[in-house]
Image (cartoon, helix red, strand yellow):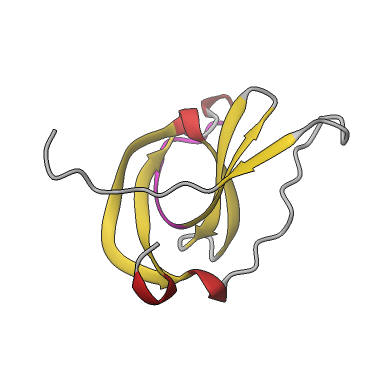
Amino acid sequence: MFKNGLFLMVSFWYNIDLAKGESNCKRCVCPLKLVFKSREWYLQGFCLMREDYRTFKINRIIQPELLEDFFHGENFNPPAIEFKGTDSSSLIHKIKAVLRKANHI
């Protein structure tokens, strides 16, 4: 988070399920939650392309990069994350993470 409740947006290529005939697509997202569920990490955010909340599996994210664009975190109210085909008693762990752009590699 930055001053006045501003957050950086991120962009990345997302590896969609090729078995369904879909290819990778570029996404620009306002990241809101990082969730660990059933031994997998997920990013929930507001997708500008879809103009809706989306949940992205972290291991399908390719070439993530921080953008120079900011968004106000308090303007978003993401829905509860539901995972299809999973037991509702499974644990979901939420963590707060801060992404920082490295000055060097």
Decide: is 50 above or below 38: below
Task: Looking at the picture, tell me which residue is in the foreground, 103 or 46.
Answer: 103
Q: Quadrant of the N terminus?
A: bottom left
Tell whether 63 sits left or right of 98: left
Hey, which residue is sitting farthest left in the picture? 104
Q: Is residue 98 left or right of residue 90?
A: left
Split into 4 quadrants, where in the image is the C terminus? top left
User: Where residue 21 sits: x, y (%)?
Assistant: 53, 31
Front residue of this view, candidates 49 and 20: 49
* Residue displayed at 88% across by 33% down: 89
Q: Quadrant of residue 92?
A: top right
| Vertical position of residue 2 compared to residue 11: above or below | below
Give the percent coordinates (x, y) of residue 47: 50, 58
Residue 15 in percent (x, y) is at 45, 33
- Please give the name of the residue rendered at 41% of the width and 37% of the height, measured from the top-left corner: 24
Q: How many marks?
A: 0
Seen at 60% across and 59% down, the residue is 53
Residue 13, image x, y percentages? 37, 41
Nearer to me, 18 or 33: 33
Q: State which quadrant residue 80 falls in.
A: bottom right
Q: Is residue 95 magenta?
A: no
Please provide the residue range marked out in magenta. 20-30
Q: Where, by quadrant of the figure, is residue 67 drawn?
A: bottom left
